[in-house]
Image: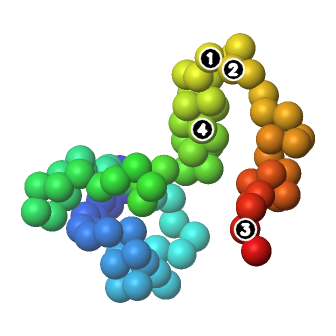
Amino acid sequence: MAEVRVYEGTLDEIAARHGKELAGRRLKVTVADDQPGGEEMPFYKTASAEEWSRAWHAWVDSHPANTPVLSDEAISRDSIYEGRG
């Protein structure tokens, strides 16, 4: 049976301390749900590109599809700043 070593810390900390030692080795990673101070990390700090995409599409789909679209005139620069200088 293979020898098992335990390295504790964030992935960045472990890579900085043991990167060369671990290069090319098979690793098994266990992720702890607890964060220092008992605070959960916010979505924007932990989400992958796929998670961002799913969240964006879920947000878009949560809005009514029959919302009227503004006309080009309604959103033109001239009509937005009408009456100014």
Residue occupying the point 11% across, 55% down? 38
Q: What amino acid does circle 3 point to? A: Arg
Which residue is tagged 2? 67
Of the image marks 2 and 3, the number of the one nearer the N terminus? 2
Q: How far apart are marks 2 and 3 (CA)?
A: 30 Å
Work out which residue is located at the far left of the displayed protein and give it: 37
Q: What amino acid does circle 1 point to? A: Pro
Q: How far apart are marks 2 and 4 (CA)?
A: 18 Å
Q: What amino acid does circle 2 point to? A: Thr
Which residue is tagged 1? 64
**Residue 84's disc number:** 3
The residue mark sitting in front, 1 or 2, is: 2
Which residue is tagged 4? 56
Q: How far apart are marks 1 and 4 (CA)?
A: 15 Å
Neighbours of disc 1 within 10 Å: few (<14), some (14-19), many (20+): few
Residue occupying the point 15% across, 64% down? 36
Of the image marks 2 and 4, the number of the one nearer the N terminus? 4
SS at badge 3: loop
Q: State the image coordinates of residue 17 (x, y, percent, origin top left).
A: 35, 85
SS at badge 1: loop
